[in-house]
Amino acid sequence: MSSLPEPRSLAQNLNPDNRLSHQPQQQTLTQDSPGVQASALLGKRVESTAGNKLGSVSDLIIDIRSGRVAYVIISSGGFIGIGRQQKVVPPGAMSLATTKRNTVSLDVTLDRWKSAPIFNRATMARLGNPAPARQIYQYYQQSAPIAETQSSTSPPDRRNHLELASRLRGKAVVDRQGHEIGTISDLLVDLGSPKGAFAILKPGPFITVSNKQAMDQLFAVPINYLNPDGQSDRAILESTPTQFQQAQPLKAGDWDTPVGASASVPKIYRYQPANNNAFNQAAPHHAAIMFATTNLG
């Protein structure tokens, strides 16, 4: 079902040409509120910088090898869900720093948007290959991630390293012995930079049995520390209860720390959702519905 339109803000009423006004300070990561939760982005209205309605955010595609957000999926067109198309957009082409409530902007003209590359679930694996990735990024005048560009000179990696954020959310996390470390409750992302995303973990019995305080806490782990379990749909994280007990609060500066995919000791942080971040104020029930009902064909 289509959602009711958001009421016009004062800033919109003072903006006669309906263009999106940018406020860079809203996108700056503060010490207390790094990033934005992926669930808070779902369903957000997407407009061009000229104020044209383009669609809404329906999901994110995560490169689990590098830990970055590779693409944002935008649902566009159609009527009450019929005839809608899915399009993928480089995250750097989008901005959360707008004066319109529940709206993100995309740097593209309406004419180019109409002919933008179409996405469907069956071909998602191809988006991780260098040539298609460069084609999509260049369409939006963005530079493809370095890792994707460099891979064209090395032997091709046949494994699918792209995953939908909606499929990561709710995934169980265990260690190699099968101990229940926790569940991914959400993702923490920063669309405007090449920084890696974090998985927000709700700790499980293996962590809470020796640390009762952890039952009321959330933790953040860089996504590229999580490895797929070849035997099930779970993710594997090599960690100990002590690492969770000693975890320090996640701060904006921690996003700047390079994270090597081959690092043996994962970086684990305590995560406190920011109460002063407007995008993180999205109704959690609505966000859960969006994750559960997203259909990408």
Image (cartoon, rainbow, N blue to C red):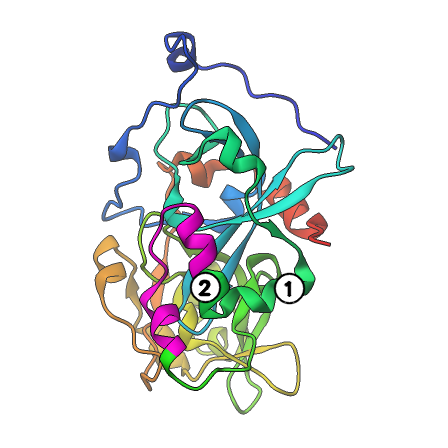
At 21% from the left edge and 57% from the top edge, which residue is drawn?
A: 253
Residue 242 at x, y percent in the picture: 35, 80
- Callout 2: few (<14), some (14-19), or many (20+) C-alpha neighbours within 10 Å? many
* Secondary structure category for the residue under label 1: helix
Q: Amino acid at mark 1?
A: Thr
Q: Position of residue 190 (x, y in %)?
A: 36, 51
Tell me if label 1 and label 2 are in contact, CB under 8 Å. no
Residue 2, by quadrant, is top right
Residue under pointer 1? 123
Seen at 60% across and 77% down, the residue is 234
Q: Residues within 10 Å of mark 1 (few under 14, many from 20)?
A: few
By secondary structure, the bulk of the magenta-drawn segment is best described as helix
Which residue bears the numbered disc 2? 199
Give the mark count. Answer: 2
The foreground one among 43 and 145 is 145
Q: Picture quarter containing residue 171? A: bottom right
Residue at the bottom extreme, as displayed: 177
- Residue at 26% from the left image edge and 34% from the top image edge: 24
Does 192 appear in magenta?
A: no
Task: Give the residue type that dot 2 points to.
Answer: Ala
Write the start and end of the magenta stretch as one range: 134-152
